[in-house]
Amino acid sequence: MTISKRKLPKFWPFADRPSLSMQLMAVGLAITLFFVLIAIFASTFQGWGWLQNPTVSLTNPQGEAPSWNHWFGTSSEGYDVFSRTLFGSQAALQVVILATAFSLVIGVPLGLVSGYLGGRLDRVLLFVMDTIYTLPGLLLSMTLAFVVGRGVLNAAIAISISYIPQYYRVVRNHTVSVKTELFIEAAQAMGADTWTVLSRYLFLNVIQSVPVLFTLNAADAILTLGGLGFLGLGLPTEVPEWGQDIKMALSALSRGIWWTTFFPGFALTLMVVGLSLLGEGLSEFVNPGLRERK
């Protein structure tokens, strides 16, 4: 007697043999969750004595290679590189979540209103957003960071400005195509006001691509934050941050101290790769047509 396998529903992405994009998305999800857990529990690990205080260096030897006592070695200033690398994920996630949330909260409503109402408001917003979009993201973030100063909130604001046009353009284009559907016209004929149409009928139909854009922007925001930190425009010097740590470690490379740049740089790269893989996989997941063609 043979036992029949349970048949999974067709919409389940792993019902058949998962595609390469889905496998990579699983890898990206695992990497992302790993860094999220580190960021959440870093302070707890420090309280338990498993991690050193990343801002204290007087008790450590300077420039010590990786060893059992200091897994990632110590910097020329005596900081424990392992502790600063793990706490760097905390600073990165704080800034990235704030930056992408700011741009989403501003860009999505503007895209909805602009695409639905059209007219002069649509033309003005298109001009403003296209102007911002043409500016290099890192250069714009550098300029704003120089104006508003250092800090988690200030860095998030400086980074978020360059992402608002992306959410605006995606949502606005979807809104323009969806607002001509019959169910929208039926709602208008039944007397639904603008707010009801936008919130009840349009919103859920135009944000399918927003999670994908959110993930890819998060990966780019980590690189931008690292660039700001490397240029001395990111977070305060007492806050562990990967770009800032790489900048501090450059002078020690000539003396053969490679670990102070390798581990923060590797952590930054790994987190960006994880978020990028997750975003690419989500792009296929939310697009059934693309998944079926593959």
Image (cartoon, rainbow, N blue to C red):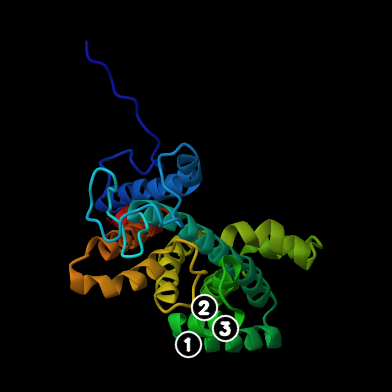
Whole-percent x, y for residue 250 in the image? 29, 73
Quarter of the figure with residue 10: top left
| N-term mark: 2 or 3 | 3
Q: Amino acid at mark 2?
A: Ser
Q: In the visual, does 208 lie left or right of 14?
A: right
Whole-percent x, y for residue 294 in the image? 27, 55
Query: How far, Cα to Cα, is label 1 from label 3?
Result: 10 Å
* Residue on which the image places disc 2: 162
The mark lying in front, picked from 1 and 3, is 1
Q: In the image, which disc is placed on residue 163?
A: none
* Residue on which the image places disc 3: 129
Instruction: Look at the image and tell me whether residue 100 can be seen.
Output: yes
Whole-percent x, y for residue 283 in the image? 40, 59
Front position in the image: 25 or 49: 49
* Residue on which the image places disc 1: 135
Label 2 Cα neighbours within 10 Å, binned few <14 / some 14-19 / many ≥20 = many
Instruction: Look at the image and tell me whether residue 186 can be seen.
Output: no
| N-term mark: 2 or 1 | 1
Front position in the image: 204 or 282: 282
Whole-percent x, y for residue 259 in the image? 24, 60
